[in-house]
Image (tube, coloured by chain):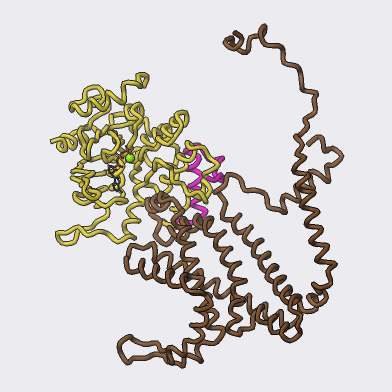
Chain colours: A brown, B yellow
Amino acid sequence: MSAIAPPATADTAPPTPDYSEYKLVPARHPWRWVGTVVVAAGVAAIAWSLVTNPRWEWGVVAQWFTAQSVVNGLIETLKLTAISGVLGFVLGFILALMRLSASPLLVSVSWTFSWIFRSTPLLVQLLLWYNLGYLYEKISLGIPFTDVRFFEAQTTTLISQFAAAVLGLTLNQAAYSAEIIRGGILSVDQGQLEAASALGIPAWQRSTRIVLPQAMRAILPNAFNEIIGLVKGTSIVYVLAYSELFYTVQVIYNRTQQVLPLLLVATLWYVVITSVLSVFQYYIERHFSKGAVRNLPLTPLQKARKFFATHVAASPTKDAR
Amino acid sequence: MSIIAARKESTTTATPAAGTPAEAAAHVSAGTAPAAATRGQVDITNVRKSFGATEVLKGVTLSVPPGGVAVIVGPSGSGKSTLLRTINHLEKVDGGYITIDGELVGYEVRGNKLHELREKDILKQRTNIGMVFQSFNLFPHLTALENVIEAPIVAQKRSKTEARKRGLELLDRVGLKDRADAYPRQLSGGQQQRVAIARALALDPKILLFDEPTSALDPELVNEVLDVIRELATSGTTLIVVTHEMGFARDVADTVVFMDDGLIVESGKPQDIFANPREERTRSFFSKVIEPAFNI
Ligand SMILES: Nc1ncnc2c1ncn2[C@@H]1O[C@H](COP(=O)(O)OP(=O)(O)OP(=O)(O)O)[C@@H](O)[C@H]1O
Ligand SMILES: [Mg+2]
């Protein structure tokens, strides 16, 4: 009966008590606390063992961490990463555009490139580039099928360890980044291009001002994955005896026999580089998410500032929050 | 047969009624286009278009005079959007031609052939033709104001300060001056569509094309967009509007054009075509779409 009656009639519903003087108490989450304690205990145990176990030889780590030879190796690693990262993404961008073009030839060349370089091990590619002199004694630039040559040189003088490393890493990187960039471009709604052409915006600006900024949201997380992979991937060029970070520490521990501490030196540097890149990634992604999310989330810095403003400064009146 | 009818009707009926210019002048805020329209004559002549084997436009002929308001109605798939898109050469025609103030759209005459223009020249023509899409298609990474000033700066090379000033005027005109710095996703559908209209107006087009500008909107947001278009209808810009809003067509159109199956079946003044359609197909279409909306 009461279900049928209109709910708001005063004689059927009991009068609502006045709660306005009551305090609001947020729900408690006991299991969240249990989880936090367990994880904290685990982290503390690991940290303790790292600090107290003498076999990690932290003294040796500290001694080599900023040694001149290690720093030189680090610089070579950064150089390789930067050069092949930039060249790889530029070439990848061109390959992506070829792949998306209307020309069947451009599409198939781009496809074949990605196919070859993604299906051969990087190690093999590096060794092939380095030993190119065995396959082709001379490299020349000229008009094909004629005797006209603008430039000719011995392959072995042209392809140094550095050149082989950059070539191998760049071409390999280009094959992967082409796919990442293509995916990003495809993720942008077709209507965006149409609206831009209807407004008379030229093709180049359509790509750079309308499509790419939106594609970046899909490209960036994968691109940073690739760059971070590349930082550590450069360690593979040790097969060319190229003195980047990893090869350098190998040379050192072969001499001093302090294998683990020196591997730790290299590892810590890779962690530092990756951490710096991650911070960059956070802020760059944030920049390109403008307009894609209704409201930008606070940065960690802003969060910390807000936390201190509300919790520390106003702690006596915490309930008022 | 029906093509000839369409042509005759539109040229006779699309002349604005006496007294309209004065009324328009009262509506138009200072600094906008003059009400006495002298530009924006659209002539579509025997336009054909096929997608694969299906012929979507089967020879469409339509004229809209400067400052005229043509509303195109018709069942889904009849080719309304396709026709609209041929007017700014987003869709290439397979036959026939379109002129705006006597200038061919997308082609130029060389000898006895029509050669397609280069991209650069087509883009330049498009700045004369504003287009508003059903799905808004605002650029989500740009604010409302940035959306409006993008084309003036990039396509027309206007100065940034000048473009901003004009952009704010236009946002004011569509009632969104205070939302200039909002991103599209922070706006309601109706507000987004009004920004899209301001964006189309920023190039000072002779002609504005609307493809179902309100069909993606909640019913309560439809009117705020229609009101803006209504105001534009009195400003001297030529409007070609595809819509399912029959009440709006009745109020605002000079000419209502009924399309079915790739052809213009009939066109005329709204009061004539709604009350006394000559063709059976028109009659049956209107009886389906108008009957329920008895209060328009
Ligand atoms: N790019 C395309 N490729 C193939 N077919 C298409 C394409 N665009 C439109 N069509 C077809 O052309 C016909 C007309 O389409 P159009 O979009 O012009 O119809 P419409 O009158 O606007 O319909 P609606 O009221 O549903 O929007 C439809 O049958 C559609 O499937
Ligand atoms: Mg349509």
Relative to the observer, which residue lies in front, A85 or B253?
A85
Residue B272 placement (x, y as % from top left): 23, 25
Q: Quadrant of ligand 2?
A: top left
Is residue B62 visible in the rendered image? The answer is yes
Q: How many marks?
A: 0
Which residue is located at x 72 percent, y 15 percent?
Answer: A16
Relative to the observer, which residue lies in front, B185 or B29?
B185
Residue A258 placement (x, y as % from top left): 76, 80
Which residue is located at x 42 percent, y 42 percent?
Answer: B135
- Identify the image quadrant of residue B57: top left
Which residue is located at x 49 percent, y 78 percent?
Answer: A125
Residue B267 is inside the magenta segment = no
- Would you say A60 lies left or right of A128 here? right
Relative to the observer, which residue lies in front, A226 or B117?
A226
Residue B159 is inside the magenta segment = yes
Among all residues in the image, which is located at the extreme top? A11
**Where's the C terminus of chain B, which quadrant?**
top left
Is residue A167 visible in the rendered image? The answer is no
- Would you say A155 lies left or right of B44 here? right
Region of the chain picked out in magenta, as a range: B158-183
- Identify the image quadrant of residue B29: top left
Q: Main secondary structure of the magenta part?
A: helix
**Where's the N terminus of chain B, which quadrant?**
top left
Residue B230 placement (x, y as % from top left): 39, 33
Among all residues in the image, which is located at the extreme left? B1
Relative to the observer, which residue lies in front, B233 or B115?
B115
Which residue is located at x 83 percent, y 46 percent?
Answer: A312
Residue A242 placement (x, y as % from top left): 61, 84
Up-down relation of residue A171 to residue A128 (above or below): above
